[in-house]
């Protein structure tokens, strides 16, 4: 069987990942996180967004020992590292943003200090504009 | 009868229905994503503190820890329990009504 070839070398799109679910009650958060890591492998632009209960995914101090589930929150630190690498590496065009919607954060009594990664806090209006600029949106 | 709520109050109306349809004095236990209702300073804090006047309110400690919610963020009048405490509540109050 001949190998399939894709003419995608050098193609970079703007991806947005919209996280709207709390981390452990459903599998959505973990699945989106996996997809984000794949876009790092392909050096795609990514806006990782946390709205509604999704803001709870990046809450500090998660400890799942007593519920016997995997604590995947340290992986968001990897996302932050990817973002910083992209910013510092001059040979890399990849742009990553980590965004929290202000309204969702405040409705839950949270502040940027509650998050384990550094985030851009945008209002709904500002986020709507960024969202409208995307080429691919993956939601969970 | 003891009532349990395992959904986030920001995403579902499970807690609203539980509060509306539970008899005064019957305990309500928040667990899994339901524990977010027990945090102070949120859009649902007033609703939950009102409910706590009519019901003994409990919240599941292991689920709080998993979600990174410190005990000083829990509203006054809500008691943290563990799995053993859940069993004790069920033994004491009989039927479990799960608001999913």
Image: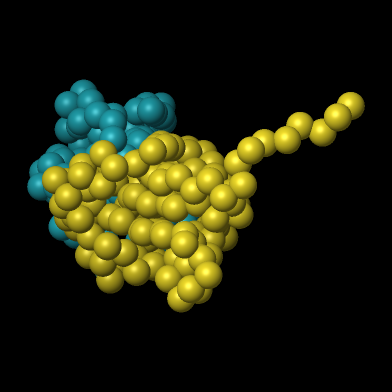
Residue located 64% across and 38% down the image: A7
Which residue is at a point 14% across and 45% down the rendered structure image? A125
Q: Nearer the viewer, residue A117 or A106?
A: A117
Q: Could you say where residue A48 lies in the image, as x and y percent from the top left?
A: 39, 52
Is the residue A88 above or below the residue A79 in the image? below
* Farthest residue, direction right: A1
Figure colour of chain B = cyan
- Residue nearest the viewer, comparing A107 with A117: A117
> Which residue is depicted at the point 20% across and 55% down?
A122
Horizontally, residue A79 falls left or right of residue A41, namely left
Image quarter in which the C terminus of chain A is found: top left
Q: Quadrant of residue B13?
A: top left
Does residue B34 show up?
no
Image location of residue A133, percent across then percent down: 29, 42
Scheme of image coloration: by chain
x%, y% of residue B100? Answer: 38, 28
Which percent across, then down, holds residue A115? 34, 65
Q: Give the residue at the far bottom of this rendering.
A: A88
- Location of the N terminus of chain A by quadrant is top right
Q: Is residue B11 visible?
A: yes
Quarter of the image for residue A13 reads top left
Q: Nearer the viewer, residue B77 or A2?
A: A2
Q: Colour of chain A?
A: yellow
Q: Nearer the viewer, residue B9 or A84?
A: A84
Instruction: Name above or below for residue B72 compared with residue B29.
Output: below
Residue A1 lies left or right of residue B75; in this view the side is: right
The tally of labels here is: 0
Residue at position x 34%, y 50% from top? A49
């Amino acid at each position: 069987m001949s190998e399939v070839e894709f003419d995608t070398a050098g193609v970079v799109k703007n991806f947005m990942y919209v996280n709207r679910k709390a981390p452990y009650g459903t599998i959505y958060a973990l699945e989106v996180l996996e997809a984000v890591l794949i876009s790092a492998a392909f050096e795609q632009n990514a806006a990782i967004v946390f709205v509604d209960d999704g803001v709870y995914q990046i809450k500090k101090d998660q400890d799942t020992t007593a519920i016997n589930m995997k604590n995947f929150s340290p992986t968001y630190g990897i996302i932050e590292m990817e973002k910083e690498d992209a910013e510092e590496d001059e040979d890399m065009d990849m742009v990553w943003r980590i965004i929290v919607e202000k309204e969702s954060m405040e409705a839950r009594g949270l502040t940027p200090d509650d998050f384990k990664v550094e985030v851009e806090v945008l209002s709904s209006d500002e986020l709507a504009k960024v969202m409208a600029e995307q080429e691919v949106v993956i939601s969970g | 009868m003891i009532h349990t709520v395992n959904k986030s109050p920001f995403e579902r109306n499970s807690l609203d229905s539980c509060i509306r349809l539970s008899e005064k004095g019957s305990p309500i236990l928040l667990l899994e994503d339901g524990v977010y209702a027990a945090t102070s300073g949120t859009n649902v804090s007033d609703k939950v503190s009102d409910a706590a006047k009519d019901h003994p309110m409990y919240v599941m400690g292991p689920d709080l820890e998993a979600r990174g919610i410190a005990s000083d963020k829990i509203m006054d009048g809500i008691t943290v329990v563990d799995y053993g405490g859940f069993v004790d509540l069920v033994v004491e109050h009989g039927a479990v009504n799960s608001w999913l």
